């Protein structure tokens, strides 16, 4: 009843092919965007910098992984390393060309990550599944090693870490330690929204359908004229590009400084969890998954002591880890297709409400 | 030219110049390889019986070692702690079967893989809550394992030092593989295990209880994990860092084949020796530390030529 497209007639091809063909969807997206824009008015600095900003960035990284694993069906455990490539190349670009706008650098740094992704994606032409996961693990450990050993990457810094210099965007400081949380939030929000829209269109289009064909049945896809080489490598390239941009943003807008350990396999797993809990092959699921994995531990850390459960700070962290592990298993058992599936079921229910079925 | 000399000739000159050092390096690699092989063995057991790629094997090793040491620290005698640790692994196996594997029967591989990663998170948290996060000393001598070392003179060429615990590790690994081979081939349960590995449905139809078999196989993997935990703990401390090392089992399995127990052993040895020798003789050329990724690259190259591994049963799905 609330979510029903009956009566919404499409009279042009353009109207028929728009991204959100249902009016309620358009209204919903609009409301969410307005709320996101208004968030800094009510949220504290802590909420913006420690929750909202990393949530948006990790959601973007999850979308990147989802392109590869969810849409193109290639399992990857190297997301963290590809994010690292983005972060380090952005740092190099910013220090070599300080006069160019930092947003341009962030968007460019994804290109380097894409190149790395294509190189390590080459084995996918011959192998798949768990075997491919091993080659992406090779990427993870090799690139991590590069971040430690190649001192040119961090400008021969004695600490081995990269520190983000302050950069301005039309007169406002947006990176570095001095930049305000609200400013950074808006920049991150803008980039994430624009990139999500672009990816949504990419997936609806020819190339996205090719990825899904390869995922569902590679041999059939090949017989129908999809070139596996092009489809797979483009999935690796686009996925790594998005991850690279997310990685650059992770350092430039969230961490402020970073060492190689940030982009370790832990981050790869975290993003993979987000993709799976959210739902493979779903963009809205990427946001759900990122929210679940990123915000839940924070809630537990803040919430458990508040509930009167009196335990040491260290123990809270460990309990949070246990709870997350248990919840992951629980979700896999209850709904293997992720939160996005629950969302879809909810929409179906709303469509026929107040009747149990139509 | 200089570069080529450094890569192609110089390492071999060094090897010939100091054979005792080479033997020492190969021995170190061999011992590391035995431990990789033990971890890979746990993977293979579970993969064979249930087709699940058990990511949690690494943390099971840590958990087994931690419960052993933790119980001993609480004042339990070593032999009782060992029995209790075996009991804990049995309880863990039953719980995993009941709460994780049974509800997830028939799900795609990636879901099962994720479930084992979820288990990893849970066990890390549980282990830290119960035993604390700091590294612990393994109770080597209390368990009756040798701790000394023997130096072998090699004429005038120097000497090679072998730790007794390493020899013990190799012997125990060998016994364990032998025991498992007998168990798989000669006992009723072992045959049932192989039947389940071949075809779940067919095994069910001839009256084999899948749930029981899975609990047994997870328990067997738990025992292997305990042995690995003791051996690894005796060389370095029992700590959660082992979890990353356990990922090395993946290239080992690619080399040996996902379903082969001898393959796990040989693959482990090749990876162990290969990465030690590579690190010592070639690592210096690129700044060292290549141990962290060399194993994966070896596996990568290997995949191009023999995707089913050295002893794998069938050709994997090729594209």
Image (tube, coloured by chain):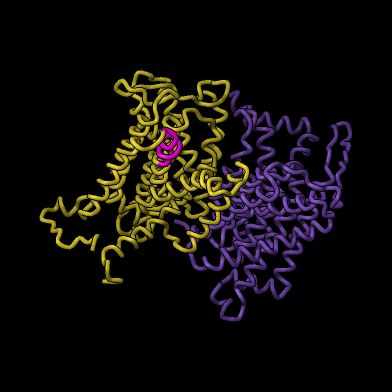
Q: Return the x and y of residue A257 as percentages of the image width and height.
A: 49, 28
Q: Nearer the viewer, residue B279 or A186?
A: A186
Residue at left offset 51%, top offset 24%: A154
Instruction: Note whether residue A136 is visible.
Output: no
Residue at left offset 62%, top offset 46%: A311
Q: Nearer the viewer, residue A299 or B173?
A: A299
Q: Quadrant of residue A117?
A: top left
Colour displayed for chain A in the image of the structure? yellow
Colour displayed for chain B in the image of the structure? purple
Q: Return the x and y of residue B60 as percentages of the image width and height.
A: 66, 54
Q: Tell me the magenta residue range.
A: A45-55
* Magenta segment includes A8: no
Q: Return the x and y of residue B12 as percentages of the image width and height.
A: 70, 33
Relative placement, left or right, of A234 versus B259 is left
Relative placement, left or right, of A123 versus B230 is left
Q: Is residue A102 above or below residue B153?
A: above
Q: Is residue A212 above or below residue A153?
A: below
Residue at the bottom extreme of this rendering: B206
Q: Is residue B95 above or below residue B166?
A: below
Instruction: Note whether residue B210 is visible.
Output: yes
Task: Please state, as top left, top right, bottom left or bottom right, where the C terminus of chain B lies in the image.
Answer: bottom left
Residue at the left extreme of this rendering: A11
């Amino acid at each position: 009843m609330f979510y029903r497209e009956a009566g919404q007639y499409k009279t042009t091809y353009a109207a028929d092919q728009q991204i959100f063909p249902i009016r309620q969807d358009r209204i919903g997206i609009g409301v969410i965007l307005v709320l996101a824009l208004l968030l800094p008015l009510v949220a504290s600095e802590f909420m913006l910098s420690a929750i909202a900003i990393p949530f948006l960035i990790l959601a973007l990284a999850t979308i990147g992984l989802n392109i590869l694993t969810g849409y193109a069906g290639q399992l990857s455990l190297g997301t963290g390393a590809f994010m690292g490539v983005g972060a380090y190349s952005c740092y190099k670009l910013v220090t070599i060309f300080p006069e160019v706008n930092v947003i341009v650098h962030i968007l460019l740094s994804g290109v380097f990550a894409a190149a790395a992704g294509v190189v390590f994606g080459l084995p996918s032409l011959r192998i798949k599944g768990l075997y491919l996961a091993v080659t992406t693990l090779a990427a993870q450990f090799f690139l991590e090693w590069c971040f430690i050993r190649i001192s040119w990457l961090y400008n021969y810094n004695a600490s081995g870490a990269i520190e983000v210099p302050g950069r301005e965007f039309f007169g406002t400081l947006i990176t570095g330690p001095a930049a305000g949380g609200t400013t950074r939030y808006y920049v991150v929000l803008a980039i994430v929204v624009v990139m999500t829209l672009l990816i949504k269109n990419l997936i609806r289009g020819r190339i996205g359908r090719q990825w899904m064909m390869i995922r569902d049945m590679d041999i059939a896809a090949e017989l129908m004229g999809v070139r596996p080489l092009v489809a797979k490598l483009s999935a690796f390239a686009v996925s790594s590009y998005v991850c690279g941009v997310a990685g650059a943003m992770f350092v430039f807008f969230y961490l402020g400084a970073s060492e190689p350990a940030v982009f370790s396999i832990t981050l790869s797993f975290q993003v993979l969890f987000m993709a799976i809990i959210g739902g493979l092959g779903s963009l809205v699921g990427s946001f759900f998954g990122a929210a679940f994995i990123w915000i839940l531990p924070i809630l537990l850390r803040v919430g458990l002591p508040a509930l009167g459960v009196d335990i040491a700070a260290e123990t809270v962290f460990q309990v949070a880890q246990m709870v997350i592990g248990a919840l992951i298993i629980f979700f896999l058992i209850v709904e293997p297709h992720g939160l996005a599936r629950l969302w879809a079921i909810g929409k179906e229910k709303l469509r026929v409400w107040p009747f149990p079925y139509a | 030219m200089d570069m080529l000399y450094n890569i192609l000739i110089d390492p071999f000159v060094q090897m010939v110049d100091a054979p005792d050092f080479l033997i020492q390096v190969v021995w170190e690699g061999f011992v590391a390889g035995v431990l990789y092989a033990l971890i890979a063995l746990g993977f293979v057991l579970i993969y064979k019986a249930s087709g699940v790629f058990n990511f949690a094997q690494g943390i099971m090793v840590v958990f087994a070692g931690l419960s052993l040491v933790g119980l001993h620290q609480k004042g339990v005698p070593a032999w009782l702690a060992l029995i209790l640790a075996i009991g804990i692994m049995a309880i863990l196996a039953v719980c995993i079967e009941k709460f994780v594997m049974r509800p997830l029967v028939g799900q795609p591989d990636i879901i099962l893989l994720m479930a084992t990663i979820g288990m990893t998170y849970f066990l890390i948290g549980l282990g830290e809550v119960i035993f604390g996060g700091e590294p612990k000393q393994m109770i080597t001598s209390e368990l009756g394992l040798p701790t000394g070392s023997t130096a072998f003179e090699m004429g005038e060429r120097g000497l090679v030092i072998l730790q007794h615990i390493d020899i013990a590790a190799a012997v125990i690994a060998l016994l364990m593989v032998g025991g498992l081979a007998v168990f798989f081939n000669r006992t009723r349960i072992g045959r049932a295990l192989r039947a389940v590995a071949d075809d779940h449905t067919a095994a069910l139809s001839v009256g084999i209880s899948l749930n029981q078999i899975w609990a047994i196989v997870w328990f067997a993997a738990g025992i292997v994990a305990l042995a690995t935990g003791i051996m690894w703990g005796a060389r370095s401390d029992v700590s959660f860092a082992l979890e990353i090392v356990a990922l090395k089992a993946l290239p080992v399995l690619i080399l040996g084949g996902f379903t082969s127990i001898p393959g796990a052993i040989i693959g482990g040895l090749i990876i162990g020796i290969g990465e030690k020798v590579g690190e010592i003789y070639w690592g210096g050329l690129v700044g060292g530390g290549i141990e962290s990724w060399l194993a994966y690259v070896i596996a990568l190259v290997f995949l191009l030529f023999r995707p089913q591994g050295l002893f794998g049963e069938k050709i994997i799905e090729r594209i």
